[in-house]
Amino acid sequence: MMLLLRNVSKMQRIFEHARKSNRKNKNAILSISDISKSFGGVKAVNKCSFEVKENTITSLIGPNGAGKTTVFNIISGLAKPDAGAIRLEKKNIAGMPSYRIAQSGISRTFQLTKVFRNLSVRDNMLIAKKTNDEEIKKVLKGVYFEKSLDTIASELSYGQQRLLEIARALLMPHKLLMLDEPTAGVNPRIRQELRAILKNLRKEGKTILLIEHDMEFVMDISDRVIVLNEGRVLREGRPKDIVKDKRVLEAYLGK
Amino acid sequence: MPLLDILPQLIVNGLIAGSIYALAASGFSLIYYVVKFQYFSHGAIMSIGAYLFFTFMNLMGLNYILAGILTVIGCVIATLLSNWLLYLPLRKRKATPAIILIASIVLLIFSSSLMLAFFGSSTKAISLAKHNKTFDFGIFTITLVQTAIIVSALILFLFLWIILKKTKLGKSMRALADNKDVAQVVGINPEKIYNYTFIIAAVLGAFGGILLGLEQNLYPRMGVPIIIKGFISSVVGGLGSVPGSIIGGLFIGLAENVGVLYLPTGYKDVISFSVLLLFLLFRPQGILGVKMRNV
Amino acid sequence: MYEYLIAVFAYIFIYIILVVSLNLAFGFTGLVNLGHMAFFGVGAYASALLTLHGIPWYIALPASGLIAGSFGAVIAAITVRLKGDYFQIVALGLAFIAIAVSRNWISLTRGALGLPGIPDIIKNNFYYMLFLFAVALLSVVFLYWLTNSETGKIFQAIRDDETAAAVLGKNTYLYKVLSITISTFFAGIAGSLFAHYISFIDPTIFDLEFFVIILAMLIVGGLASISGSILGVTVISLLLSAISFVFTNISPELIGAMRQMLLMLILLLILIYRPRGMFGKVDV
């Protein structure tokens, strides 16, 4: 009897392992169903549904005004959805205040970088998590951030601020990392670094939801791509399927 | 019904006070609407207006039309100086609206000590006695000066409405108020429009000051209580809404005076502040204002 | 001269508590509390009324802090949730409402006549000044510790970017209410100490003229710097006292006007040309 039980649990572990290594059968960390949001009569997001699976990079693409950032804001609680449900694992987080969503495990960055400009690099990081200098330095090193911990954030270049913001989001304990156009508005050198960072994060098996405009890069790094247009999911699939899709091209180029 | 007998008189008194409050509120609100900060130094301009009119009329013996014109010119100059020397540099260095508000309060206090230094602390009165007479309508009485207060305030509000709604300048002001960046893209020069806006506010302030000086005595810190009433009226009417601020001013004037039916006269202030408190708590967007969104 | 110096320093210690507490809300948390003087006044009136009704000062002093702090907590709880200038507007409106209440609730405050005969905490002025020094020191040490603590850093993060603080899991609403509560508690304490020092208070305690002096001390010293506030209070207090000494042959009325003009001019110049004041950590 005992032997049998042990074997069952062993089998379960093997099964679990197999599931993790198989990219197709992963658990959904985040699942969004039918969320809508209008601003003054304009539907920014219209019955949008998609999933983000564990240990994958999912990219949201779409033309300007497609509602990508609004979707991010709804997930992170900065905008309240008019309708729909958002589940982080089993928990419905739709309509929760942003700090509770963050505490539940969603970490994010912004298109226009938000650092605490009058605080030092160290204090910026400490807001995300109470920890020691070693861990802070480790995370900062992981994003190729090279300035001293005592530098005041406003004295950093915009690119360095972007790296700090990503490091801060990484330091906060999270299940899902959401990056809103990390490569926008930074110089080519930082852009290269950001690509390397994302590749490393992918190797580490992080679960990431990404908004990004650089198609070549998106297709290279993503496990799944979701195309938004006029607040709806236009198409969803593997990168190689999306590149070939006619409707996606139309949405980008205009009909 | 002795209470109802005095009601018409109270309403007339309320309209007189309300017209002056509305002049304070409309200047405050116009700047808040276009230039986006709380313009407390409008009270300074009103006290300067009152003291200048007093100087030209009573000390220099000019006739009231000439005195009035010179007062308006004086207030426009003072207002433009405050913009060029204080508010423009602050805007240039991108000071927050809170800091510009503080600067405007500081300027208000500065001007009251300036008045104190020039005119002393004793109260002054503008004497228009030879021009004044009282009309008795049976149910209420009103003096010629008081009639002039209401009429000139109404004319000013009409002008303000025409400028805002019917002229190219008004269109530019509304565009700037709506979105400064977009306004600049379509070729509006913000600083130029701000100058015109300050000039209009100065005219409102000059007349507000003259009318206030006709209704009450002059004293150095008179600009402080009147702009507090202007602020209350603007909040009640809806911050950022110029018509709202005028309605708010008349509303506060009427509430203070009609409220005397129920409360001792000493409680005038309590009425306006209670109205302010009620609005702040239950209708922060005011009568006509835009609703403030939750975080 | 000796008595005069004692008075100058007594005021300096009271103002240090007041200005440092304002700095907590304004400089460290970014909450422009233009109604700070209302809480100072509430503390002064609370302490005066309590002691005039026979309650000993050692209860009245903390009680006035708690009363001012509870008012602060309630006002903040209602207002800081809303965006934009709303908090500023309410705070300023509140200061005006405080004037009206103190002037018109005659049965409680005696209106414009004010409340005379507020009992001393310590009769001897020199020893009272030392007592004020001790309270100021305690307050400053506490606020210094607070602003450098984890909570203090979160206050500053909220000032710099509230949204970013929220998506890092901080309940920004609660922190803002906390900051205002602590800030107004100390304003109330300062008010109580003030009332017991001058032994007479009236509604002018709420005047804008008084508030701008406090603001000048804060901004000259610099936002988000406690040592700046201490220096700002000291420099401005000494400057204002010095003016009274230099011009002895001018009428006190004119001296008052000149002092005020000079101070306002300094404040305006700082706002325009040196927004960080002497030791400020952030621009205003």
Image (cartoon, grey):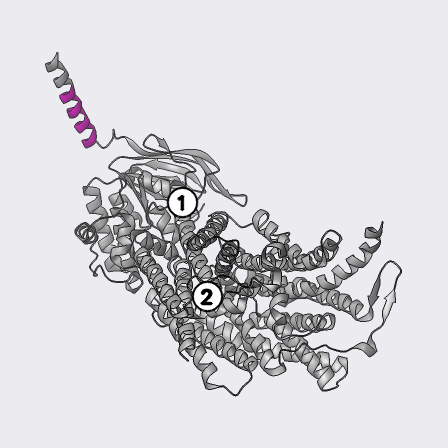
Q: Can residue B197 be seen in this view?
A: no
For the point 43% across and 50% down, the residue is C177
Evaluate whether label 2 is on the same chain as label 1.
no
Say which residue label 2 marks: C197
Between C93 and B90, the one lying in front of the other is C93
Q: Nearer the viewer, mark 2 or mark 1?
A: 2
> In the picture shown, does residue B39 fall above or below B285?
below
Between A163 and C96, the one lying in front of the other is C96
> In the picture shown, does residue A123 fall above or below B126?
above
Mark 2, secondary structure of its residue: helix
For the point 73% across and 70% down, the residue is B215
Say which residue label 1 marks: A73
Q: What is the CA distance from the residue labelled 2 to the residue labelled 1?
A: 54 Å
Q: Where is residue C61 in the image (x, y as percent from the top left)?
A: 43, 56
Q: Residue furthest left?
A: A3
Between A165 and C252, the one lying in front of the other is C252
| Quadrant in which residue A117 is drawn | bottom left
For the point 34% across and 58% down, the residue is C143
User: Looking at the rendering, in which quadrant would you find the N terminus of chain C?
Assistant: bottom left
Q: Which residue lies furthest to the top in this view?
A: A1
Horizontally, is B120 left or right of B143 in the view?
A: left
Task: Inspect the image, locate mark 2, and give the three-letter code of the amino acid beneath it.
Answer: Tyr
Total labels drawn:
2
Mark 1, secondary structure of its residue: helix
User: Looking at the rendering, in which quadrant would you find the C terminus of chain C?
Assistant: bottom left
Does the segment drawn in magenta span residue A148?
no
Between A61 and B80, the one lying in front of the other is B80
Horizontally, is A236 left or right of C49 in the view?
A: left
Magenta residues, dominant SS class: helix
The stretch in magenta equals: A9-21
Q: Position of residue B145 (x, y in %)?
A: 79, 71
Marks 2 and 1: CB-CB under 8 Å?
A: no
